[in-house]
Amino acid sequence: MKSGNFSAATEFLLLGLSEDSQVQPLLFCLFLSMYLVSVLGNLLIILAILSDPHLHTPMYFFLSHLSFVDICFTSTTVPKMLVNIQTQRKSISYTGCLTQICFVLTFAGLENGILVMMALDRFVAICHPLRYKVIMNPKLCRLLVLLSFLISVLDALLHTLTALGLSFCTDLEIPHFFCELAHLLKLACSDILINNILVYLVTGLLGVVPLSGIIISYTRIVSSVLKIPSASGKYKAFSICGSHLIVVSLFYGTGFGVYLSSAATHSSQKSAVVSVMYTVVTPMVNPFIYSLRNKDMMGALRKLISRILSFH
């Protein structure tokens, strides 16, 4: 427990990525551009999948949900940051901070779950192709998404409700551009042992276990692909999985990077910069990764854009 004056927190101060007033306009333009690209790109992916009957398969069902989660994920953090830069105010209410933490944890957990489902889909498609339609039926796909959503919400509520009981010191400055649980716990003057135990336990269960499942799935996939006699068959199989592997590497790499950087360095500013990768950059580049490497998706996007332009 920290020593110091206790405060009934009514609001926190988000210091952002930089306190230099000359850098603020550049940050505003940069993050506004990234946010618009992220929302527009993911929205186009969703509309393209919905409008093309050929893309009504489990793989694209999960991809459309991943795009929706990416829109929600980045919308939880970036708009508040843009408002703070524009109004020159850094404050966020106590309720707003806890709400933001709850939504960030929910959408991060949901993205984690959907990435695991996509790995499962690729595993069944390549290792059990004859039983693919039977196993990955629409009912199972919907149940998997619903289960992931419920687990993510329960996890977020668990962390948020335990944070409600914390008392805070008079220093209520968060060196970040959004409220993150790890930074909130550092400001607490009360005992955070239970909170830390929950963080490590949940990180192990909902982080390490799903990642291990993805690694095991791809180990089996690689083993099956290597048995394919033709080189073109191997290339097609690996190209199908390539986009998903890139997104998984970005999500888990940057996610674990945040916690490793915060543990290895006392500079919270560096941790905030790393957080930009998984909260802003990854949702922005996901549509490009899945569309540029996929002929079916590119074809659906062209049809969608031509339909939109034909209305004008």
Image (spheres, rainbow, N blue to C red):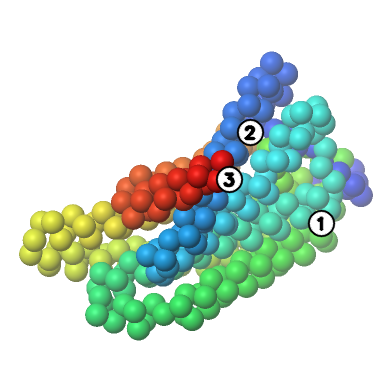
- Say above or below: 12 vs 53: above
In which quadrant of the rendered view does residue 135 lie?
bottom left
Under tag 3, what secondary structure? helix
Mark 2 and mark 1: span between their CA atoms?
34 Å
Mark 3 and mark 2: span between their CA atoms?
11 Å
Q: Nearer the viewer, mark 1 or mark 3?
A: 3
Choose the circle earlier in sequence order: 3 or 2. Answer: 2
The location of residue 53, given as percent across then percent down, is 42, 66
Q: Are marks 3 and 2 in contact (CB under 8 Å)?
A: no
Choose the circle earlier in sequence order: 2 or 1. Answer: 2
Under tag 1, what secondary structure? loop
For the point 40% across and 47% down, which residue is it? 302
Disc 1 crowd rating (10 Å Cα; few below 14, some 14-19, many 20+) is some
Query: Does residue 287 appear left or right of residue 36 in this picture?
Result: left
Query: Does residue 196 appear left or right of residue 291 in this picture?
Result: right
Choose the circle earlier in sequence order: 1 or 3. Answer: 3
Kind of residue at disc 2: Leu
Query: Does residue 37 appear left or right of residue 154 in this picture?
Result: left
Relative depth, front residue between 164 and 39 = 39
Under tag 2, what secondary structure? helix
For the point 51% across and 56% down, which residue is it? 46
Disc 3 crowd rating (10 Å Cα; few below 14, some 14-19, many 20+) is many
The residue tagged 1 is 166
The residue tagged 3 is 39
